[in-house]
Image (spheres, rainbow, N blue to C red):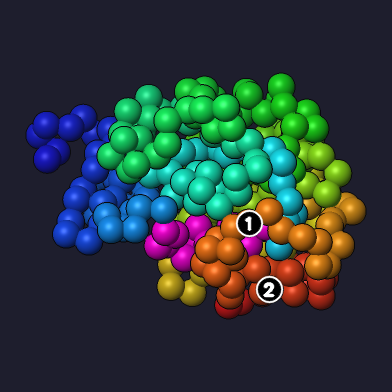
Amino acid sequence: MSGRIPPGAPFVLKGWRSAELRFAEGTAQSRMSRWFPDRLVVDYTRTMLGALALVPAPRRIGMVGLGGGSQAKFLHRHLPGAEIEVFEINPGVIALRREFRIPDDNARFRVVEADAAAQLRERVDAYDLLLVDGYDASGIPAALSTQRFYADCRASLRDGGVVAINLYDTAHAEHLHRLRLAFGAAQTAVVDEPRQSNRVAFGWVVPLALPGTATMLTKAGRRELADVLPRIAALVGRGHASVRR
């Protein structure tokens, strides 16, 4: 495979049960069940969407990184009232969207080939929910690691908005420091993923939705996140800075 694909170029590894997006042998960037393509099969993707406990009725969602589209597909299916904008800088990743059954662009869903770090500067007060999961073959790109980027994440959120960030096998302490500078330590939290080398960090803009605010999620979506939503709600409600699952 390495003789046919340039180093660092995305490719699909297919098995009987799943398909994986990879940039290199041995490391999956995203995984899809071939029988249930809209299901969230990787733990951290479900934890990130625990943010919906804090912003249960998002009208506009921004995403940094398309990958195999796990969260994009889930949100498109289970939040029919939300508009979703996905930024992906790698055209090779976008070219594989049909392999992962990612919906075509439509009135409420679109994938934009662009540098998310640059685009967020133009999206002030644009989103109720922002999901950051941008990686290349080397990890989190430099453009998504600056204090300016975290400040732009904060500025892109409306009042009551939430950002969820995947930190995988990286200098997570530096990223958390920048997140806390941007949002304030009292408006951040981090969750460890015990079965993966991931941490999911959250930042939010007060005031958050009141407990019990009606969710826009479909019943099926609520069932899939049934164990995640109360855990994230309790984490923020207790005011803890971190929690281990």
Q: Count the marks: how many?
A: 2
Q: Give the quarter of the image for residue 145.
A: top right
Q: Please, what is the three-letter code of the amino acid marked with disc 2?
A: Pro
Queried whether the magenta region covers residue 68, the answer comes back as no
**Residue 81 at x, y percent in the picture:** 65, 43
**Nearest the camera: 227 or 188?**
227
Which region is colored magenta? 39-52
Q: Kindly report the secondary structure that dominates the magenta region of the rendered protein.
A: helix
Give above or below for 113 relative to 11: above
Quadrant in the picture for the N terminus: top left
How far is mark 1 from mark 2, CA to CA?
Answer: 14 Å
**Nearest the camera: 10 or 197?**
10
Tell which tag, 1 or 2, sits nearer the viewer. Answer: 1
- Please give the name of the residue rendered at 38% of the width and 30% of the height, measured from the top-left corner: 94
**Nearest the camera: 153 or 219?**
219
Q: Residues within 10 Å of mark 1 (few under 14, many from 20)?
A: many
Q: Is residue 114 left or right of residue 195?
A: right
Quadrant in the picture for the C terminus: bottom right
Q: Earlier in the sequence, mark 1 or mark 2?
A: 1
**Residue 140 at x, y percent in the picture:** 50, 42
Circle number at residue 217? 1
- Please give the name of the residue rendered at 74% of the width and 69% of the height, measured from the top-left corner: 233
**Nearest the camera: 143 or 245?**
245
Residue at mark 2: 230
- Please give the name of the residue rendered at 75% of the width and 74% of the height, measured from the top-left corner: 234
